[in-house]
Image (cartoon, coloured by chain):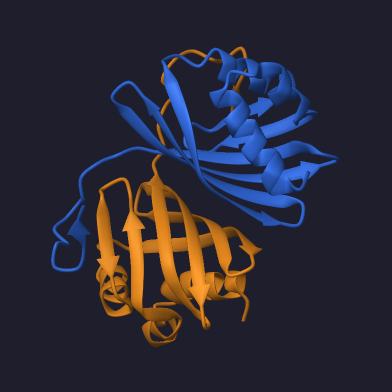
Chain colours: A orange, B blue
Amino acid sequence: MHAAAIVRAVWEGMEARDWESVRRLLADDLLVTWPQTRERIRGGDAFLELNRTYPGDWHIAVEEVLCDGDRAAARVTIVSGGDTFYVSGFYRVHEGRIAEATETFAEPGTPPYDRSHLAERY
Amino acid sequence: MHAAAIVRAVWEGMEARDWESVRRLLADDLLVTWPQTRERIRGGDAFLELNRTYPGDWHIAVEEVLCDGDRAAARVTIVSGGDTFYVSGFYRVHEGRIAEATETFAEPGTPPYDRSHLAERY
């Protein structure tokens, strides 16, 4: 599988709660960085457990995945109860597994100043 | 220029406040979507003006750009005063200009629950 297919399979496997399949696509020495909270998750086991036990009845929709050699980028929407997260992930794949990831989780809000002459709301 | 080079040149041109160069890399009928605020910006002129007049003394660092045919994805950090934004953008390029973009702006925060047995802070 190329990098984009692996990244898509991980997100879709999490939505399916198919934890065994997800684990096989994560490197044992995976390093995940979440810059917003300055957190690092080391190892496929820890990252799997963090996702498996993440609170809430969350659901994942993969919007698009780009592939650039051994790298991929994914745009994902997660809905959990009344909360929505616009997730972006940048990944490096090695030997068929995700080896590195940097993920951000953007939340809904209101425009921080009046720019309605340039931007329409939908 | 391929899609990644165009996207990088737009971000770096904004950091340089080189508005003429940036404008040449935006399609006249550019469509930008900011899902967090449910805003759409239509047209290269409007998008340029929105960035040109964006409040604050903001500075842009391009962390990585991926290229997948006519699409690209960029991971960017913006620092403005004491604020940091972890920006992700997904782009489609047509005839040497950005034609479509979806961008998110993730902000720093604290972990929403205790997961310190799985994630270290840095």
The residue at the point 21 percent across, 52 percent down is B122
The residue at the point 63 percent across, 39 percent down is B8
* Number of dots carrying numbers: 0
Estimate the x, y position of residue B23 in percent, counting from the top left. Answer: 73, 22
The residue at the point 13 percent across, 58 percent down is B114
Q: Nearer the viewer, residue A118 or A40?
A: A40
Estimate the x, y position of residue A34 in percent, counting from the top left. Answer: 33, 54
- The answer, for residue B75, to whether it is visible in the render is yes
Q: Nearer the viewer, residue A121 or B91?
A: B91
Q: Which residue extends farthest front?
A: B16
Estimate the x, y position of residue A36 in percent, counting from the top left. Answer: 31, 45
Which quarter of the figure is the N terminus of chain A placed in? bottom right
Which quarter of the figure is the C terminus of chain A placed in? top right
Classify residue A111 by image quadrant: top left
Q: Nearer the viewer, residue B105 or B40?
A: B105
Classify residue B89 by image quadrant: top right
Residue B49 vertical placement versus B68 (above, below):
above
Tell me if B84 is positioned left or right of B35 in this view: left
Tell me if B48 is positioned left or right of A28 in this view: right
- The answer, for residue A122, to whether it is visible in the render is no
Estimate the x, y position of residue A106 in percent, counting from the top left. Answer: 41, 43
